[in-house]
Amino acid sequence: MKRSHQVFIAGATGYMGQRAIPALLARGHRVRALAREGSRGKLPAGSEAVVGNALDETTFDSRVAPADTFLQLVGVSHPSPAKAAEFRSVDLVSVKASAKAAAGAGVSHFVYVSVAQPAPVMKAYVQARAEGEEAIRAAGLNATFVRPWYVLGPGHRWPYFFLPFYWLLERYPPSRDTARRLRPVTLAQMIAALVFAVENPAQGIRIVETPEIRRAR
């Protein structure tokens, strides 16, 4: 196994956070998990709780060190066009706060769950995530941007119906690249991609698109 990492996670009690933490702990990594006071009980056993507000770096920046990796998982649940304002007030504000805290703590690698770009729909969501990537770049951090379009899992299964359409579109040259970029990935594939990113730190900026996520083990 690769060397052990100390990982600070924002969004630790969410859809991916609650699965990523056990996966990282099982591979020998140490996890410090950011959560609000009322949500700390949702953190998986074995992680160290850091009580704070993901939208305000002053509530947690002093607790990031000695982490060498920052994993940013904060996001509005079940994104939809109706949540455009929340993408900016939650997703974007939180990643800017995390990037500032990570840079201040001397974190050597920042892992950000972004979104597939470009995309024909959900423009506000894509824009907020793209601006999040720019904030990380501006902070001067080495970073991995993991760009799924949709993550299939508990409570997120309806797109299974459309998978045959993606399969067909991938075989039609004009739509092949778009279909591959926007095809949903499974939660297991996503967690594997995040663990791989943690264990293989980027130098500079690395972008992991959907085809790479689907190959993660």
Image (cartoon, helix red, strand yellow):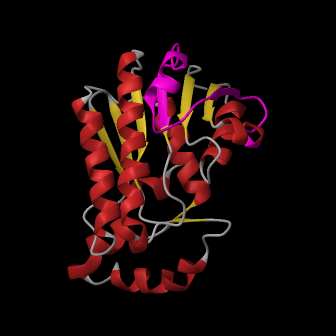
Q: Is residue 172 visible?
A: yes
Q: On the rendered structure, is 192 left or right of 39?
A: left
Q: How many marks?
A: 0
**Residue 166, quarter of picture:** bottom left
**Looking at this view, is 28 or 1 the one in front?**
28
Residue 99 among those drawn in magenta: no
x, y (%) of residue 103? 35, 21
x, y (%) of residue 211? 40, 59
**Looking at this view, is 23 or 105 the one in front?**
105
Q: Is residue 209 visible?
A: no
Q: Which residues are magenta?
A: 42-71
**Residue 169, quarter of picture:** bottom left
**Looking at this view, is 17 or 182 the one in front?**
17
x, y (%) of residue 42? 75, 43
Q: Please give the name of the residue rendered at 56% of the width and 19% of the height, measured from the top-left corner.
A: 3
Q: Please give the name of the residue rendered at 43% of the width and 86% of the height, measured from the top-left corner.
A: 165
Q: Please give the name of the residue rendered at 58% of the width and 31% of the height, measured from the top-left corner.
A: 52
Residue 34, compared with residue 207, is above or below; it is above
Residue 132, compared with residue 60, is above or below; it is below
Q: Please give the name of the residue rendered at 25% of the width and 25% of the height, measured from the top-left corner.
A: 140
Residue 60 among those drawn in magenta: yes
Q: Quadrant of the N terminus?
A: top right
Q: On the rendered structure, is 187 left or right of 213?
A: right
